[in-house]
Image (cartoon, helix red, strand yellow):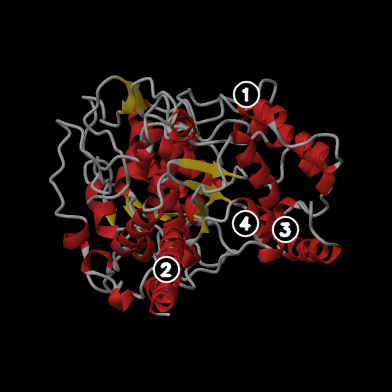
Amino acid sequence: MMQKRRWKTVGLMRKMLSCAICTIAMMALLSVHLHVFPPCSKLPDPYRLPHPQIEIRDKILGKEQEQSWTSEITPPNVYKGPLSFHQCSDRNPNCTKLWKPPPNRNYMPCTQPSPNYTSPSESRGYLLAHTNGGLNQMRAGICDMVAIARIINATLVVPKLDKKSYWQDSSNFSDVFDEDHFINALANDVKVIKKLPKEIGTMKTVKYFKSWSGMDYYQEEIASMWADYKVIRAAKTDSRLANNNLPPDIQKLRCRACYEALRFAPQIEAMGKLLVDRMRSHGPYISLHLRYEKDMLAFSGCTHDLSPAEANELKMIRDANDNWKVKDIDPREQRSKGFCPLTPKEAAIFLSALGYPSNTPIYIAAGEIYGGDSHMGDLQSRYPMLMRKETLASFEELEPFTNHLSQLAALDYIVSVESDVFMPTYSGNMARAVEGHRRFLGHRRTISPDRKALVRLFDKIEQGKLKEGKYLSDHVIESHRKRQGSPRKRKGPISGTKGTDRFRSEEAFYVNPLPDCLCQGQSRNLNTSIRTS
């Protein structure tokens, strides 16, 4: 009898022990997949962000260093650290194949001006600039205004950001960019001031600079206006300077302005670094610029996989926007020509065909996805580790940036530049800006989908004529072997094009700064990141 009780007791203890082991195992498994971040108030000091109104430059970015043209400087908005693809094991060649940057061929940043480059000449007047477009369109425009100010011997007034376009963002320059650093970093190039002096009288004019203009236009037509005016205001800033055939020192100045002087405001840089660190805690990651937002679909007229009601809503938005000149768009023709962004489902099929496994961490660099979960289901089911700003950071952490689309876009920009792989689903302004920055920083892996070719494959899959598997994967990998961001010279105009169409067909300067700002050989201003530790 006693022996029976003992066996019962031992059996009960064994069951309890088995349950405990199972519980511990389940908790360990969940902890791997669920990375929960505490609210801002409970974050440890290294992850706690100060209030955006508090000056945090010294704590985050360190002291400014005196500039000299005797040596190339590392931009102060750069932080050094190995890319997370180094976490790949040498025993896993597939990991290296997916994450390792393409061969750089020893191209390094070379933005130092020539020996003949001088300090700014005596200013002949003031250049005001009202930027237009979203964050990355404004970035390019600001950098071009720096170069134009140098060409026409002007004092540049800190540009005004666009507050009236689709984005309706009330941010000022100093809310998005580090204004003091911008002024100081360009001291050897152009005099920059925060505000126009009050004593300036009525000798002002507004001028629409011609798109893609060269030195002759600015040195002759625009510079001649100083005889009658003290202030010239550029009504628009997008694409006002030619991509090619400019003096080397002007091209290098554009790169110094873009990649060294124009850094984000301290609170944006700090939040961006925090998001990057949290993404890297999961290992190597992809930043997917999923351009499937309402404004993009309305502008492009792309309606594939949308309901009739959704397609009609987008057409109404396009018809109501006076800045969008093309109203009648054939969505099928747009898609067949590769003019539409990949849908979330198509992006998932493409990444899968390239070989990225389902546990790949993916950062969604985008605004609100049109249709929300109804269009994200296929991507989410294939790649469950989808993350956004809102899932990586708490409400309290993101609150200072809420309702400021330019500042939120800046966070996406930072996470995208720092990613192991960047893949845009459409070649818009952000895609081009990030690609150019990643080329400047060492040709990091940037996958450019051949949308026109992919559409034919996607259609065959939908029609049941092609199955996903080895054949599709081999075909996609081979056709994209040379679309990974490896070094190449900037593309010129398409043969046979003339006038503005010729300029439009060129690859934009900020998409690929080679050969102007990248040289083969050693360089002391090689940048490996966009923040300072």
Residue tagged by mark 4? 380
Crowding at dot 2, Cα within 10 Å, few <14 / some 14-19 / many 20+, comes out as: few
SS category of the residue bearing label 2: helix
Say whether marks 1 and 3 touch (CB < 8 Å): no
Earlier along the polypeptide chain: callout 4 or callout 1?
4
3 or 2: tag closer to the N-terminus: 2
Pick the quarter of the image with the N terminus.
Answer: bottom left
Q: CA distance from mark 1 to mark 3?
A: 33 Å
**Marks 4/3: CA distance?**
24 Å
Which label sits in the foreground, 4 or 2?
2
Amino acid, disc 2: Arg
**Mark 1 sits on what residue?**
478
**In the rendered structure, which disc, 4 or 2, sits on the residue that comes first in sequence?**
2
Identify which amino acid the numbered label 1 is placed on: Glu
Q: Amino acid at mark 4?
A: Gln
Residue picked out by circle 3: 298
The residue to which callout 2 is attached is: 14
Frontmost of labels 1 and 3 is 1
Give SS at disc 1.
Answer: helix
Against 289, is 471 above or below?
Answer: above
